[in-house]
Amino acid sequence: MSVVSVRFDDEEMKVLNDFAKLYDCGISSLIKQIVFQRLEDEYDLKIFAEYEKDKKNGNLKTRPISDLWKELDL
């Protein structure tokens, strides 16, 4: 397991402590959750932007949902 060190001033630590208490977790867990949620959100936005670009450029391939159901034998 790796360890990362981050420095916070007193006011930042107060905010982190308050939120950690609110979510009933430790500061490390809180920071880890926030970081990974943000990364996931950024990834989702990137994928959506690519989708919109493909849609705008006419490069998007779609098919009826009924084809998928047949393919999955549902």
Image (spheres, grey):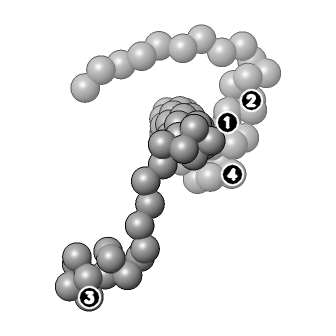
CA gap between label 1 and label 2 equals 5 Å
Q: Which mark is residue 22?
A: 4
In three-dimensional space, the C-alpha distance between marks 4 and 1, rounded to whole angstroms, equals: 9 Å
Location of residue 27 in the rendering, given as x and y in whole percent from the top left corner: 55, 35
Residue depicted at 66% across the width and 15% down the height: 8
Depth check: give the residue in front, 57 or 16.
57
| Residue 50 visible from this viewpoint | yes
Measure the C-alpha gap from mark 2 to mark 4. Answer: 12 Å
Q: Residue drawn 43% across and 74% down?
A: 64
Q: Answer few, some or many: residues within 10 Å of disc 1's Cα (few below 14, many 20 plus, some between 14 and 19).
A: some
Between marks 3 and 2 in the image, the one whose residue lies nearer the viewer: 3
Tell me residue 40's x, y (percent). 50, 40
Image mark for residue 74 = 3
Residue 34 position by quadrant: top right
Q: Are marks 4 and 3 in contact (CB under 8 Å)?
A: no
Query: Which numbered disc, 1 or 3, marks the residue that appears first in the sequence?
Result: 1
User: Dot 2, how many residues are within 10 Å of its Cα: few (below 14), some (14-19), or many (20+)?
Assistant: few
- The earlier-in-sequence mark between 4 and 1 is 1
Name the kind of residue labelled 1 in the image: Asn
Residue type, mark 2 in image: Lys
Given residues 17 and 43, the one toward you in this image is: 43
Q: Amino acid at mark 4?
A: Leu
Contact (CB < 8 A) between labels 1 and 2? yes
**Label 1 sits on residue:** 17
Q: Quadrant of the N terminus?
A: top left
Q: Quadrant of the C terminus?
A: bottom left
* Residue name at image x 48 percent, y 42 percent: 59
**Which residue lies under the disc numbered 2?**
14
Provide the secondary structure element on which disc 4 rests.
Answer: helix
